[in-house]
Amino acid sequence: MRDKYGVSQDNYCYPNSDVLKNKLNILDDATLEDAELAFTAVRYTEYSSAISSINSFNLAHLKTLHQQLFQDVFEWAGKIRTVDISKGLTRFCTCQRIEQEATKQFSRLPLLIKINSTEELITVIADIFCELNIIHPFREGNGRTQRFFFEELFFFLGLNVEWPDITKDKWVEANIQGYNGDLKPFVQILTDATS
């Protein structure tokens, strides 16, 4: 059995199932997705940022945000995945290289405070966002955690964020195009979000 990430049976799923093991013992994908959305929405509103330095935007913080959002649903919330995954034709970073590759991307963030142009800032952030999406550090919940992380980063940099009301397909397509080296669609999404 293969799940939506192209993984044959792995230790994150219930035996003979593609449903992720969860604290709620939900055995149906649609019900689990609804529960994830409900719990993460509450945990999102409970979060209060204490970040005072650009250097705090790192892998440890991304893991903290994942833990914050998914603590009610998954035992492994906030932990780096230990299986290799792909989605469609997109193969994500091998699990053995996640920390190394993520650290490279997070090391670029302190340089953002030296950028004076909002347009350039958004382009660099779009590139880092797409690179982190390719790394896909968690077994599930990467998109929500990344949006949470970058929303906080934008606020730290003095930009307000309101994610545009776009379809999931449009969001995924922009990420795929970013994966393939075309950042324009994702830059547009971030531009719209911070306008």
Image (cartoon, rainbow, N blue to C red):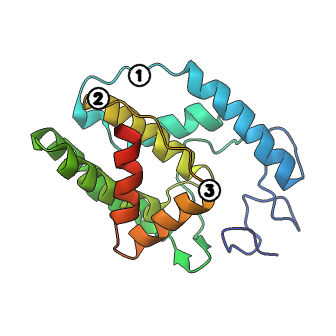
Residue drawn at (79%, 42%) of the image: 34
**Residue tagged by mark 2?**
156
> In the image, which is nearer the foreground, mark 3 or mark 2?
3
Marks 1 and 2 in Cβ contact (< 8 Å):
yes
Q: CA distance from mark 3 to mark 1?
A: 27 Å
The answer to which of marks 1 and 2 sits earlier in the sequence is: 1
In x, y percent, where is residue 153? 33, 36
Query: Label 2 amino acid?
Result: Phe
Task: Say what secondary structure mark 1 lies in.
Answer: loop
Residue drawn at (57%, 80%) of the image: 89
In x, y percent, where is residue 97? 41, 66
**Residue tagged by mark 3?**
168
Q: On the picture, is 53 further left or further right than 68?
A: left
Which quadrant of the view contains residue 40?
top right
Is residue 71 placed above or below 31 in the rendered structure?
above
From where the camera sits, is residue 79 visible? no
**Residue tagged by mark 1?**
49
Query: Label 3 amino acid?
Result: Lys
Residue drawn at (23%, 28%) of the image: 53
In x, y percent, where is residue 152? 39, 32
Badge 2 local density, few (<14 within 10 Å), some, or many (20+)? some
Image quarter of the C terminus: top left
Q: On the picture, is 71 further left or further right than 172?
A: right
Is residue 54 placed above or below 13 in the rendered structure?
above
The answer to which of marks 3 and 2 sits earlier in the sequence is: 2
Query: Label 1 amino acid?
Result: Ser
Task: Say what secondary structure mark 2 lies in.
Answer: helix
